Image (cartoon, helix red, strand yellow):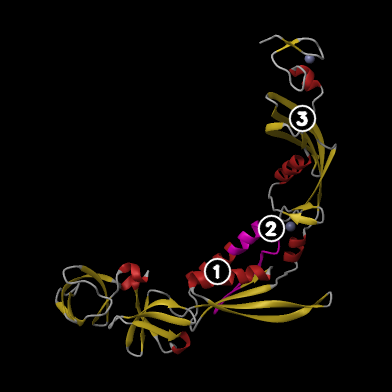
Amino acid sequence: MKNLACPVCGRPADNLIDGKCKDCFLKTFTLARIPHIVRTIICPLCGAVKKGAHWEGNTAELEDVIHVGIKEALKLDSDARDVQVSIDLTNSDPSIYHANIRVDANVKGIGTNAALRTEVRVSRDTCDTCSRISGGYYEAVVQVRAEGRFPDEKEQVQLVELIEEVIERQYRKGYRLAFITKVDELPEGTDVYIGSNSSARQACKLAAERFGCSYSESPTLVGKKDGKDIYRITYSLRLPRFVPGDIINTRGDAVLIRHSGKRTTGLLLRSGLEFYENTNRLKDAVKIADMDDAMDAVLISVEDDIVQVMHPTTFRPVTLKKPAHLSGRGGEDIRIVIIGDEVFILPPYKENE
Ligand SMILES: [Zn+2]
Ligand SMILES: [Zn+2]
């Protein structure tokens, strides 16, 4: 194979790169360049980095920010492949870092490397978001409440976590106003103060989807900016009074709740017929049981519209009118709930959970 000669130095070569031997090619090749000074402005509170007029990201470690700054300032030859950059930092004071950079790459089949040096000058400035947080800035308040009752602690925690989830997702997307200014725990619920109105609305929508909450918005005029009215929005987020799986007594009927929102739907347990009602007409209803009270029982027989169920604690047969949701013929296991001394047959598991 060594029958080629380099036209530049005349030495034999296995193959030529850009018409030269490997050594002659590398002599004129520059793998990477970097300016002598790289400047970085970082927020000391959140680690955001200033890019032009804007702030971006949030990296907790200054050295990570410097690494990113160096990599962004590094100009690599367009033929460089499999690039690996290692950076060794030393600092003489908190604002000046000296970087020794080694770049390894593959260029046109040749492994090569470059050693570079630069100085990173770090200046610190409070970012727009942190100055707003420290000023108590908020665009919206989400009031976590429940309809006709106080939400329990678990529900409040779930909803605050849901709000945090939405905020975090939006913050990661670069929504810099997606932050929580303050969380107030009150006897009737929790108030969450939020930097961005769109995050607050997004959280309410998700709460409606996930927990059947209802919400209303009310704006308050707080001032003017550039001739425009500035509003703050209060979201009254209400958990439904009853949740799916609750069994309620409404005007003597036992109803298994399936959906609870503006309208409540469910199953009338005695007859097996569907139940629909405007939720605001259920003010007198009370919860009498839920799915945690369900028990297994044996369906003894079904004859026309009369069924017999083995009572799971007394082992005596109980005779009931056949509800429409019962499909068994006798002999199988069913789920029941006992309320007072009455036995109710529950629909098959999947239907309501
Ligand atoms: Zn040569
Ligand atoms: Zn900041």
Q: Are marks 3 and 2 in contact (CB under 8 Å)?
A: no
In the structure shown, which secondary structural element does the residue marked by tag 3 occupy? loop
Q: Which residue is mark 2?
A: 174
Q: Which residues are magenta?
A: 166-191
- Residue 180 belongs to magenta span: yes
The image quarter in which residue 20 lies: top right
- For marks 3 and 2, the one nearer the N-term is 3
Q: Position of residue 350 (x, y in %)?
A: 34, 67
In the structure shown, which secondary structural element does the residue marked by tag 2 occupy? loop
Relative to 133, residue 95 above or below: above
- For marks 3 and 1, the one nearer the N-term is 3
Q: Which residue is mark 3?
A: 31
| Tag in front: 3 or 2 | 3
Q: Are marks 3 and 1 in contact (CB under 8 Å)?
A: no
Residue type beneath disc 2: Gly
Q: Is residue 275 visible?
A: yes
Residue type beneath disc 3: Leu
Between the C-alphas of marks 3 and 1, the distance is: 50 Å
